[in-house]
Amino acid sequence: MVLYTSPFPNSFLSVLHSFSWGLIFPCYWLADRLVASFVPTTYEKRQRADDPCYFHALCIIITTPIYLALLVASLPFALIGFLLWSPLQSARRPYIYSRLEDKNHANGATLLTEWKAAGSGKSFCFGSANVCLLPDSLARFNNVFNTQARAKEIGRRIRNGASRPQIKIYIDSPTNTSISAASFSSLVSPQGGDSANRTVNAGIKRTTSMEYKGDNSGSNNSEDSREDKGGAGEPNEGEENTCIVRINGEENGHMSDAEMDAVNGQAHASGPAEPSAEGDAEISKTPNHKQKEGDSGSLDSYSASRESLVKVRVGDGTVDQSTVNNKLLYKASIMKKTSVRKKKHTDETFDHEISAFFPANLDFLCLQEVFDKRAAEKLKEQLHHYFEYIVYDVGVYSCHGCCSFKFVNSGLLFASRYPVMDAAYHCYPNGRGTDSLASKGALFLKVQVGSTPQDQRIVGYISCTHLQAIAGDTTVRCEQLDMLQDWLSEFRKSTSSSSTANPEELVAFDVICGDLNFDNCSSEDKLEQQHSLFTHYKDPCRIGPGEDKPWAIGTLLDPEGLYDEEVCTPDNLQKVLESEEGRKGYLVYPTSKNHSSSQKGRKASLKGNGRRIDYMLYTEEGLYLEWKVEVEEFSFITQLAGLTDHLPVAMRLMVSTGEDDP
């Protein structure tokens, strides 16, 4: 299948489309600014109340007549442009595939080596997020604004989080596993070129092992990595640039408060993190992008929280500065070792957490509500610093391909570190109300993640979707889930080049990501909860229809609280969501469990952990029979705090081949 790298089949149509959109854009922009000036966010309301010199009303009085006059003047040109633009959409392709040609541009990503399926297995990490990149006037109804600046910052935070070192702290002590807060997890990265210093022994009274995977240099130290893996005995094939840092101590595994304070107190001896010049000026324009003390949203900010900086000690002294990079400070989520961890939910077989960062070494990213085309371009540019392959501007416009007129695309965007082999898009024809104005649908992708020594391709399937949003449209969503399954089955059949007798491809995984706009606990969503999709695909957060696992939390934030000081940074939002009382104040809850119009005024009446409408599903059906797929970790992510009204989610799958490392 040929992947479309441009929206039109020839340059003439592209030029004609650009000309028609150039006639429409002034009218579109003026209408957007005019409406936006009358829809303030809670942040702007507080700013007006706090600043007696804030002359917003005067600005509206002055600018409104100007906007109206220019809008009326631009209408004739917009009409001409629309008459050209609309018929052109019948020739438009359903997506744009962008591949990064200059590999040096992806300076945040570790170089990938091809997986040969020769070891015990390999893990793949998937992320999904609804980023609410609507035109600014529409985004304000969700209490977010400045779409263009948000798009750039969202991309920057995602690639910064994904390109950080993957550091896991394994608690070997069976008697004490108290270190679990991800805010206490920043480590200085070791010098990438000095393999002799890849292992550090320190005298902290706890036995842990930390894995460092990757660095921002983009270099491939695969030989050093393999040497370290041989000593560690745990990493799987395909994990590159791994550093093992071991902290040995007493058997009781206890760190006193005084020692902990001493560790934290010496944090600044390593120096602050190097700031990133790009985007800093634009970040200060809106509250969504303000870097405060302790804000972990950007790893390159000037400051970091006290709890996030760790000073490692050797014996009675400190580590020689030659063994660590005193300029690059990274934060990492702390993951407890499954075999020895002591969690509240001891029956769980995989790690789960609320993390202030996107997972390190994120392989695939599915985004929803990337509706604004200018914002999509800014987001793509940032993501290309880490992801080599991106599919964006997905959907149809005008009356082409769907039953009703479509003003905006599907809002879907897919980014991958692995090459995309095939892609297909389908539009849901049954959208209702305001949802019918967007070409919501499903994007299906086939990616190649490796090959066997017998030259068989190892592939995976990923589906990204966004369902009907209007409450009460349960039958519409069920019909869309039916279509999703049918389209996915057709896509797999049409793109498969294997037969049972002669398999040319081995399927490693099949994952569905997206905003499904229903949760597993609301009484109004019973039809969706019992859909056949959940008999074929597994939800790591779900026990059964109407019941989530105790550790699963909602992914829909209360828009009114987005700019509260308690949750406006990733660290703060993470800490709030770790407590039941915090979740009651800042998450939207299932309708059957919340009958109050004001959540904060009726905290005592709320139960559960919020509406979880963003899903990551996987299946064991249709995969290579000799391989086993299981969840390695699941994360709810707060790194986009203040930038969207959804919590991103991430899942790491382990594909076990059953073979031992050579």
Image (cartoon, rainbow, N blue to C red):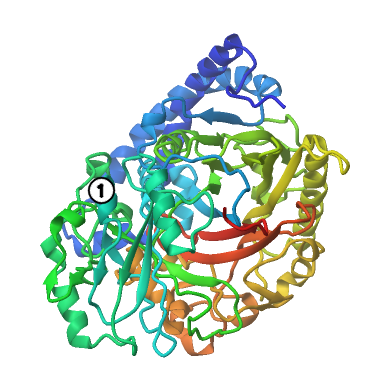
Q: Which three-letter amino acid code belongs to the residue tagged 1? A: Asp
| Image: 85 above or below 155 | above
Pick out the residue farthest to the right. Answer: 501
| Residue 574 image-quadrant placement | bottom left
| Residue 589 image-quadrant placement | bottom right
| Residue 95 image-quadrant placement | top right
* Image spot of residue 577 (x, y percent): 43, 75
Q: Residue at x 31, y 80 (%)?
A: 206
Q: Is residue 514 visible?
A: yes
| Image: 518 above or below 398 | below
| Image: 627 above or below 378 | below
The one of 229 and 651 positioned closer to us in this rendering: 229
Pick out the residue farthest to the top. Answer: 12
Residue position for label 1: 194
| Image: 590 above or below 463 | below
Q: Residue at x 53, y 41 (%)?
A: 415
* Image spot of residue 107 (x, y percent): 35, 37
Q: How many marks?
A: 1
Q: Residues within 10 Å of mark 1 (few under 14, many from 20)?
A: few
Q: Residue at x 18, y 60 (%)?
A: 51
* Image spot of residue 317 (x, y percent): 11, 72
Q: Is residue 444 visible?
A: no
Left or right of residue 362: residue 593:
right
At mark 1, the secondary structure is loop
* Image spot of residue 645 (x, y percent): 47, 60
Left or right of residue 461: residue 639:
left
The one of 37 and 103 positioned closer to us in this rendering: 103
The one of 194 and 561 positioned closer to us in this rendering: 194
Which part of the image, by quadrant, shows the N terminus? top right
